Amino acid sequence: MQTIVEDRRLPVDIDAQPVVQAAAALKPTVRHYHDEIEREQRLSPGLVEQMHAAGFYRLLLPRSLGGLQADPLTYIRIVELLAEGAGSVGWNVANNGVGQLVSLGLPDDGVQEIYPKGHRTVIAGTAVQGGGQAVAVEGGYRVSGRWTFGSGCHEAAWMLGSFQILDDGQPRRRDDGGMFWRGLFPRAEVEVIPGSWEVSGLRGTGSFDWTVSDFFLPKRRTMVHAGVPLDNQWAHWPGITYALPAPAWVGPHQCAVITGLARAGINALVELAADKTPRGRTGRLCDNPQVQDAVGRADAILNSGRIYRNAMIAELWNTLADGRETTLEQRARCRLAAVHAGDCARQAMDLMFRHGGSTSFKTASRLAEVWRDLQVVGQAATLAPEWYPIGGRAFLGLDPGPRLR
Protein backbone atom coordinates (compact mmCIF):
# COMPACT_ATOMS: atom_id res chain seq x y z
CA MET A 1 0.00 0.00 0.00
CA GLN A 2 1.25 3.48 -0.87
CA THR A 3 2.14 5.74 2.04
CA ILE A 4 3.80 9.12 2.41
CA VAL A 5 6.46 9.72 5.04
CA GLU A 6 6.04 13.02 6.87
CA ASP A 7 8.75 15.55 7.63
CA ARG A 8 11.13 14.38 10.32
CA ARG A 9 10.99 17.65 12.27
CA LEU A 10 8.20 18.57 14.64
CA PRO A 11 6.42 21.85 13.83
CA VAL A 12 8.15 24.85 15.37
CA ASP A 13 4.84 26.54 16.23
CA ILE A 14 2.09 24.02 16.90
CA ASP A 15 -0.61 26.68 17.30
CA ALA A 16 0.20 28.23 13.91
CA GLN A 17 -0.86 25.14 11.97
CA PRO A 18 -4.15 25.54 10.09
CA VAL A 19 -5.74 22.44 11.61
CA VAL A 20 -4.92 23.66 15.12
CA GLN A 21 -6.26 27.12 14.31
CA ALA A 22 -9.43 25.42 13.06
CA ALA A 23 -9.83 23.72 16.45
CA ALA A 24 -9.39 27.05 18.26
CA ALA A 25 -11.92 28.70 15.95
CA LEU A 26 -14.47 25.93 16.56
CA LYS A 27 -14.63 26.44 20.34
CA PRO A 28 -17.55 28.93 20.22
CA THR A 29 -19.50 26.48 18.08
CA VAL A 30 -18.75 23.68 20.55
CA ARG A 31 -20.11 25.89 23.34
CA HIS A 32 -23.23 26.56 21.27
CA TYR A 33 -23.95 22.83 21.08
CA HIS A 34 -22.99 22.03 24.67
CA ASP A 35 -26.48 21.84 26.20
CA GLU A 36 -27.69 19.59 23.38
CA ILE A 37 -24.63 17.36 23.76
CA GLU A 38 -25.28 16.92 27.47
CA ARG A 39 -29.01 16.35 27.02
CA GLU A 40 -28.78 13.90 24.12
CA GLN A 41 -25.61 12.16 25.41
CA ARG A 42 -23.98 12.33 22.01
CA LEU A 43 -22.16 14.86 19.87
CA SER A 44 -24.61 16.92 17.83
CA PRO A 45 -24.78 15.86 14.16
CA GLY A 46 -24.23 19.43 13.01
CA LEU A 47 -21.06 19.67 15.09
CA VAL A 48 -19.84 16.29 13.87
CA GLU A 49 -20.18 17.50 10.27
CA GLN A 50 -17.98 20.51 11.02
CA MET A 51 -15.43 18.29 12.76
CA HIS A 52 -15.27 16.00 9.71
CA ALA A 53 -14.76 19.01 7.46
CA ALA A 54 -11.90 20.27 9.65
CA GLY A 55 -10.16 16.88 9.55
CA PHE A 56 -10.35 16.15 13.28
CA TYR A 57 -11.57 12.59 12.64
CA ARG A 58 -8.61 11.68 10.42
CA LEU A 59 -5.73 13.28 12.29
CA LEU A 60 -3.67 10.14 12.80
CA LEU A 61 -4.42 8.26 9.60
CA PRO A 62 -1.74 7.98 6.89
CA ARG A 63 -2.11 10.40 4.02
CA SER A 64 -2.57 7.44 1.67
CA LEU A 65 -5.81 6.67 3.55
CA GLY A 66 -7.03 10.25 3.37
CA GLY A 67 -5.58 11.21 6.74
CA LEU A 68 -3.47 14.11 7.97
CA GLN A 69 -0.71 11.92 9.43
CA ALA A 70 -0.35 14.38 12.31
CA ASP A 71 2.47 14.32 14.83
CA PRO A 72 1.47 13.69 18.47
CA LEU A 73 1.97 17.29 19.61
CA THR A 74 -0.43 18.55 16.94
CA TYR A 75 -2.92 15.83 17.82
CA ILE A 76 -2.95 16.50 21.57
CA ARG A 77 -3.14 20.26 21.05
CA ILE A 78 -6.28 19.83 18.98
CA VAL A 79 -7.74 17.55 21.66
CA GLU A 80 -6.90 20.17 24.31
CA LEU A 81 -8.58 22.98 22.42
CA LEU A 82 -11.72 20.97 21.72
CA ALA A 83 -11.86 19.88 25.38
CA GLU A 84 -11.74 23.54 26.39
CA GLY A 85 -15.00 23.91 24.51
CA ALA A 86 -16.56 20.71 25.88
CA GLY A 87 -14.84 17.80 27.56
CA SER A 88 -16.91 15.23 25.68
CA VAL A 89 -15.81 16.58 22.30
CA GLY A 90 -12.13 16.41 23.21
CA TRP A 91 -12.55 12.92 24.67
CA ASN A 92 -14.22 11.49 21.57
CA VAL A 93 -11.64 12.94 19.20
CA ALA A 94 -8.87 11.56 21.41
CA ASN A 95 -10.52 8.14 21.57
CA ASN A 96 -11.05 8.01 17.81
CA GLY A 97 -7.39 8.81 17.19
CA VAL A 98 -6.08 5.91 19.26
CA GLY A 99 -8.76 3.62 17.83
CA GLN A 100 -7.60 4.46 14.33
CA LEU A 101 -3.98 3.77 15.23
CA VAL A 102 -5.03 0.36 16.54
CA SER A 103 -7.00 -0.34 13.35
CA LEU A 104 -3.83 0.17 11.28
CA GLY A 105 -2.63 -3.13 12.76
CA LEU A 106 -5.26 -5.05 10.78
CA PRO A 107 -4.31 -7.06 7.67
CA ASP A 108 -4.14 -4.92 4.54
CA ASP A 109 -7.53 -6.04 3.23
CA GLY A 110 -9.09 -5.22 6.59
CA VAL A 111 -7.57 -1.73 6.58
CA GLN A 112 -8.92 -1.11 3.09
CA GLU A 113 -12.40 -2.21 4.19
CA ILE A 114 -12.37 0.13 7.19
CA TYR A 115 -10.98 3.05 5.16
CA PRO A 116 -12.36 2.87 1.60
CA LYS A 117 -11.77 5.72 -0.81
CA GLY A 118 -13.68 8.83 0.29
CA HIS A 119 -14.39 7.37 3.73
CA ARG A 120 -15.64 9.30 6.78
CA THR A 121 -14.64 6.56 9.21
CA VAL A 122 -14.89 7.16 12.96
CA ILE A 123 -13.81 4.45 15.39
CA ALA A 124 -15.54 4.00 18.75
CA GLY A 125 -15.17 1.39 21.47
CA THR A 126 -12.23 0.52 23.65
CA ALA A 127 -8.70 -0.82 23.27
CA VAL A 128 -8.61 -2.59 26.66
CA GLN A 129 -8.86 -6.35 27.12
CA GLY A 130 -12.06 -8.27 27.66
CA GLY A 131 -15.71 -8.11 26.74
CA GLY A 132 -16.25 -10.90 24.23
CA GLN A 133 -15.85 -14.59 23.52
CA ALA A 134 -15.57 -16.28 20.14
CA VAL A 135 -15.37 -19.63 18.45
CA ALA A 136 -13.39 -20.16 15.26
CA VAL A 137 -15.34 -20.87 12.06
CA GLU A 138 -14.35 -20.94 8.40
CA GLY A 139 -13.01 -17.50 7.45
CA GLY A 140 -13.24 -15.95 10.87
CA TYR A 141 -15.04 -16.15 14.22
CA ARG A 142 -18.49 -16.18 15.75
CA VAL A 143 -18.37 -13.55 18.50
CA SER A 144 -20.72 -12.76 21.37
CA GLY A 145 -20.09 -10.24 24.09
CA ARG A 146 -20.81 -6.99 25.85
CA TRP A 147 -18.29 -4.16 26.00
CA THR A 148 -18.23 -1.04 28.16
CA PHE A 149 -17.08 2.50 27.30
CA GLY A 150 -18.24 2.68 23.70
CA SER A 151 -17.19 6.34 23.53
CA GLY A 152 -18.40 8.00 20.35
CA CYS A 153 -20.72 5.16 19.36
CA HIS A 154 -23.33 7.51 17.89
CA GLU A 155 -20.96 9.13 15.39
CA ALA A 156 -18.94 5.97 14.66
CA ALA A 157 -18.85 3.68 11.64
CA TRP A 158 -16.94 0.89 13.45
CA MET A 159 -16.69 -0.40 17.02
CA LEU A 160 -13.42 -1.72 18.45
CA GLY A 161 -13.63 -4.57 20.97
CA SER A 162 -11.48 -7.32 22.46
CA PHE A 163 -12.37 -10.99 22.79
CA GLN A 164 -11.06 -14.43 23.68
CA ILE A 165 -11.24 -17.44 21.36
CA LEU A 166 -12.61 -20.58 22.99
CA ASP A 167 -11.39 -24.03 21.98
CA ASP A 168 -13.57 -26.72 23.57
CA GLY A 169 -14.74 -24.11 26.05
CA GLN A 170 -11.25 -23.04 27.11
CA PRO A 171 -9.55 -19.73 26.18
CA ARG A 172 -6.92 -20.12 23.48
CA ARG A 173 -3.43 -18.99 24.46
CA ARG A 174 -1.15 -17.52 21.82
CA ASP A 175 2.52 -18.45 21.48
CA ASP A 176 3.46 -15.14 23.15
CA GLY A 177 1.25 -15.96 26.14
CA GLY A 178 -1.53 -13.54 25.23
CA MET A 179 -5.15 -14.64 25.38
CA PHE A 180 -7.01 -11.80 23.64
CA TRP A 181 -7.73 -10.67 20.09
CA ARG A 182 -9.21 -7.43 18.80
CA GLY A 183 -11.91 -6.96 16.22
CA LEU A 184 -13.72 -4.19 14.33
CA PHE A 185 -17.51 -4.51 14.23
CA PRO A 186 -19.82 -2.45 11.96
CA ARG A 187 -21.62 0.11 14.13
CA ALA A 188 -24.88 -0.52 12.26
CA GLU A 189 -24.82 -4.18 13.32
CA VAL A 190 -24.17 -3.83 17.07
CA GLU A 191 -26.71 -3.06 19.77
CA VAL A 192 -26.07 -0.05 21.99
CA ILE A 193 -27.58 -0.48 25.46
CA PRO A 194 -29.75 2.51 26.48
CA GLY A 195 -29.27 3.78 30.02
CA SER A 196 -25.83 2.23 30.41
CA TRP A 197 -24.01 5.60 30.57
CA GLU A 198 -25.43 7.41 33.60
CA VAL A 199 -22.54 9.46 34.92
CA SER A 200 -21.70 12.76 36.59
CA GLY A 201 -19.46 14.08 33.83
CA LEU A 202 -18.59 13.53 30.16
CA ARG A 203 -22.22 12.62 29.50
CA GLY A 204 -21.90 13.72 25.91
CA THR A 205 -19.31 11.09 25.02
CA GLY A 206 -22.11 8.55 24.64
CA SER A 207 -19.88 5.89 26.19
CA PHE A 208 -22.67 3.34 26.30
CA ASP A 209 -22.25 -0.40 26.63
CA TRP A 210 -22.71 -2.29 23.38
CA THR A 211 -23.22 -5.91 22.48
CA VAL A 212 -23.24 -8.50 19.71
CA SER A 213 -24.56 -12.05 19.69
CA ASP A 214 -23.22 -14.86 17.49
CA PHE A 215 -21.79 -12.26 15.12
CA PHE A 216 -19.61 -13.40 12.21
CA LEU A 217 -16.32 -11.49 12.32
CA PRO A 218 -14.03 -12.15 9.33
CA LYS A 219 -10.33 -12.64 10.03
CA ARG A 220 -9.41 -9.60 7.98
CA ARG A 221 -10.99 -7.43 10.68
CA THR A 222 -9.12 -9.06 13.56
CA MET A 223 -5.65 -8.89 15.06
CA VAL A 224 -3.94 -10.12 18.19
CA HIS A 225 -4.39 -7.92 21.26
CA ALA A 226 -0.76 -7.14 21.96
CA GLY A 227 0.31 -5.48 25.17
CA VAL A 228 -1.31 -4.50 28.44
CA PRO A 229 -2.98 -2.24 27.64
CA LEU A 230 -1.46 -1.55 24.24
CA ASP A 231 1.62 -2.19 22.12
CA ASN A 232 2.40 -0.52 18.79
CA GLN A 233 1.02 -2.79 16.05
CA TRP A 234 1.08 -0.09 13.38
CA ALA A 235 4.84 0.45 13.05
CA HIS A 236 4.93 -1.11 9.56
CA TRP A 237 3.38 2.11 8.24
CA PRO A 238 6.19 4.47 7.17
CA GLY A 239 6.78 7.63 9.16
CA ILE A 240 7.83 8.66 12.65
CA THR A 241 4.16 9.06 13.60
CA TYR A 242 3.78 5.28 13.34
CA ALA A 243 7.22 4.34 14.72
CA LEU A 244 6.57 6.06 18.05
CA PRO A 245 6.03 3.71 21.00
CA ALA A 246 2.59 3.52 22.56
CA PRO A 247 3.46 5.78 25.57
CA ALA A 248 3.70 8.71 23.16
CA TRP A 249 0.00 8.22 22.39
CA VAL A 250 -1.74 6.30 25.18
CA GLY A 251 -1.82 8.46 28.28
CA PRO A 252 -1.07 11.73 26.48
CA HIS A 253 -4.34 11.38 24.53
CA GLN A 254 -6.52 11.46 27.65
CA CYS A 255 -4.13 13.76 29.45
CA ALA A 256 -4.81 16.34 26.73
CA VAL A 257 -8.51 16.22 27.60
CA ILE A 258 -7.88 16.95 31.27
CA THR A 259 -5.37 19.74 30.61
CA GLY A 260 -7.80 21.32 28.17
CA LEU A 261 -10.53 21.16 30.79
CA ALA A 262 -8.27 22.71 33.44
CA ARG A 263 -7.57 25.62 31.06
CA ALA A 264 -11.32 26.04 30.64
CA GLY A 265 -11.64 26.07 34.44
CA ILE A 266 -9.05 28.84 34.81
CA ASN A 267 -10.77 30.86 32.11
CA ALA A 268 -14.12 30.33 33.82
CA LEU A 269 -12.88 31.70 37.13
CA VAL A 270 -11.18 34.66 35.44
CA GLU A 271 -14.48 35.52 33.74
CA LEU A 272 -16.44 35.07 36.96
CA ALA A 273 -13.97 37.12 39.02
CA ALA A 274 -14.35 40.15 36.77
CA ASP A 275 -18.09 40.42 37.55
CA LYS A 276 -18.78 38.74 40.88
CA THR A 277 -18.88 40.57 44.18
CA PRO A 278 -19.14 37.90 46.87
CA ARG A 279 -21.94 38.24 49.37
CA GLY A 280 -20.93 40.41 52.31
CA ARG A 281 -17.96 41.91 50.40
CA THR A 282 -17.51 45.28 48.73
CA GLY A 283 -14.92 44.34 46.13
CA ARG A 284 -15.03 42.12 43.11
CA LEU A 285 -13.60 38.63 43.27
CA CYS A 286 -10.69 39.65 41.05
CA ASP A 287 -9.62 42.26 43.62
CA ASN A 288 -9.05 39.58 46.27
CA PRO A 289 -5.30 38.89 46.66
CA GLN A 290 -6.04 35.22 47.43
CA VAL A 291 -7.88 34.84 44.13
CA GLN A 292 -5.05 36.58 42.31
CA ASP A 293 -2.60 34.17 43.93
CA ALA A 294 -4.77 31.15 43.05
CA VAL A 295 -5.04 32.13 39.38
CA GLY A 296 -1.29 32.67 39.12
CA ARG A 297 -0.54 29.37 40.83
CA ALA A 298 -3.08 27.46 38.73
CA ASP A 299 -1.62 28.75 35.48
CA ALA A 300 1.94 27.89 36.54
CA ILE A 301 0.96 24.43 37.81
CA LEU A 302 -1.01 23.56 34.67
CA ASN A 303 1.64 24.76 32.24
CA SER A 304 4.48 23.04 34.10
CA GLY A 305 2.73 19.70 33.58
CA ARG A 306 1.88 20.43 29.94
CA ILE A 307 5.42 21.46 29.08
CA TYR A 308 6.95 18.36 30.69
CA ARG A 309 4.50 16.11 28.84
CA ASN A 310 5.17 17.77 25.50
CA ALA A 311 8.93 17.74 26.05
CA MET A 312 8.99 13.99 26.68
CA ILE A 313 6.91 13.29 23.57
CA ALA A 314 9.28 15.49 21.57
CA GLU A 315 12.26 13.61 23.01
CA LEU A 316 10.85 10.29 21.77
CA TRP A 317 10.15 11.78 18.36
CA ASN A 318 13.62 13.32 18.03
CA THR A 319 15.30 10.10 19.15
CA LEU A 320 13.63 8.21 16.31
CA ALA A 321 14.28 11.04 13.85
CA ASP A 322 17.98 10.71 14.68
CA GLY A 323 17.87 7.02 13.79
CA ARG A 324 18.14 5.78 17.38
CA GLU A 325 15.88 3.51 19.42
CA THR A 326 13.98 4.87 22.39
CA THR A 327 14.99 3.55 25.81
CA LEU A 328 12.82 2.10 28.56
CA GLU A 329 13.69 5.11 30.72
CA GLN A 330 12.51 7.53 28.02
CA ARG A 331 9.27 5.64 27.56
CA ALA A 332 8.74 5.56 31.33
CA ARG A 333 9.28 9.31 31.60
CA CYS A 334 6.87 9.96 28.75
CA ARG A 335 4.26 7.82 30.47
CA LEU A 336 4.84 9.49 33.84
CA ALA A 337 4.77 12.95 32.28
CA ALA A 338 1.21 12.35 31.09
CA VAL A 339 0.10 11.20 34.54
CA HIS A 340 1.89 14.14 36.18
CA ALA A 341 0.29 16.62 33.78
CA GLY A 342 -3.08 15.13 34.68
CA ASP A 343 -2.34 15.61 38.38
CA CYS A 344 -1.29 19.20 37.69
CA ALA A 345 -4.61 19.79 35.93
CA ARG A 346 -6.46 18.45 38.98
CA GLN A 347 -4.53 20.79 41.30
CA ALA A 348 -5.17 23.81 39.09
CA MET A 349 -8.89 23.01 38.83
CA ASP A 350 -9.23 22.49 42.58
CA LEU A 351 -7.86 26.00 43.15
CA MET A 352 -10.36 27.47 40.71
CA PHE A 353 -13.29 25.52 42.12
CA ARG A 354 -12.50 26.59 45.68
CA HIS A 355 -12.24 30.28 44.86
CA GLY A 356 -15.44 30.29 42.81
CA GLY A 357 -17.37 30.15 46.08
CA SER A 358 -21.00 29.09 45.94
CA THR A 359 -21.04 29.57 42.16
CA SER A 360 -18.82 26.52 41.82
CA PHE A 361 -21.44 24.03 42.92
CA LYS A 362 -24.40 25.38 40.97
CA THR A 363 -25.33 22.89 38.28
CA ALA A 364 -25.51 25.49 35.51
CA SER A 365 -22.13 27.01 36.39
CA ARG A 366 -19.29 26.62 33.90
CA LEU A 367 -16.98 25.90 36.83
CA ALA A 368 -19.25 23.06 37.94
CA GLU A 369 -19.46 21.65 34.42
CA VAL A 370 -15.69 21.67 33.95
CA TRP A 371 -15.04 20.24 37.41
CA ARG A 372 -17.42 17.32 36.79
CA ASP A 373 -15.92 16.47 33.42
CA LEU A 374 -12.37 16.83 34.70
CA GLN A 375 -12.98 14.47 37.61
CA VAL A 376 -14.29 11.79 35.24
CA VAL A 377 -11.28 12.09 32.95
CA GLY A 378 -8.99 11.92 35.97
CA GLN A 379 -10.37 8.47 36.83
CA ALA A 380 -9.15 7.01 33.53
CA ALA A 381 -6.77 4.08 33.93
CA THR A 382 -4.21 5.82 31.71
CA LEU A 383 -3.87 8.58 34.32
CA ALA A 384 -3.97 6.40 37.44
CA PRO A 385 -1.37 6.90 40.22
CA GLU A 386 -0.22 3.30 39.82
CA TRP A 387 1.94 4.51 36.92
CA TYR A 388 4.33 6.24 39.34
CA PRO A 389 5.66 3.02 40.91
CA ILE A 390 5.71 1.36 37.48
CA GLY A 391 8.02 4.12 36.29
CA GLY A 392 10.00 3.97 39.50
CA ARG A 393 10.70 0.28 38.99
CA ALA A 394 12.07 1.04 35.53
CA PHE A 395 14.43 3.66 36.93
CA LEU A 396 15.55 1.30 39.71
CA GLY A 397 16.52 -1.38 37.21
CA LEU A 398 13.62 -3.62 38.21
CA ASP A 399 11.04 -5.23 35.96
CA PRO A 400 8.32 -2.59 35.50
CA GLY A 401 5.79 -5.25 34.46
CA PRO A 402 3.84 -5.79 31.26
CA ARG A 403 2.14 -2.39 31.23
CA LEU A 404 5.37 -0.57 30.34
CA ARG A 405 7.60 -1.98 27.61
Image: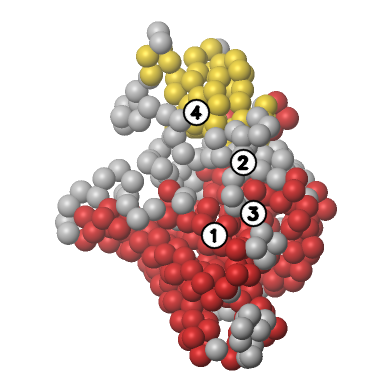
Give the Cα distance between marks 1 and 2: 16 Å
Secondary element at tag 2: loop
* Observer-nearest of 327 and 282: 282
Disc nearest the viewer among 1 and 4? 1
Give the Cα distance between marks 2 and 4: 20 Å
Write the residue at 55% across / 19% down. 143
Q: Earlier in the sequence, mark 1 or mark 2?
A: 2
Furthest residue in direction left, as rendered: 397
Disc nearest the viewer among 2 and 4? 2
Secondary element at tag 3: helix
Amino acid type, callout 3: Ser
Q: Earlier in the sequence, mark 4 or mark 3?
A: 3
Q: Taking 310 as reference, is 48 above or below it? A: above
Q: Earlier in the sequence, mark 2 or mark 3?
A: 3
Write the residue at 27% across / 61% down. 329
Percent of width and height locating residue 294: 49, 81
129 vs 352, left or right, is: left
Q: Which mark is residue 374?
A: 1
Percent of width and height locating residue 268: 64, 74
Q: Which mark is residue 151?
A: none
Give the Cα distance between marks 2 and 3: 14 Å
356 vs 312, left or right, is: right
Amino acid type, callout 1: Leu
Q: Which mark is residue 131?
A: 4
Q: Earlier in the sequence, mark 1 or mark 3?
A: 3
Residue that carries the numbered disc 3 in the rendered image? 88
Percent of width and height locating residue 308: 41, 72
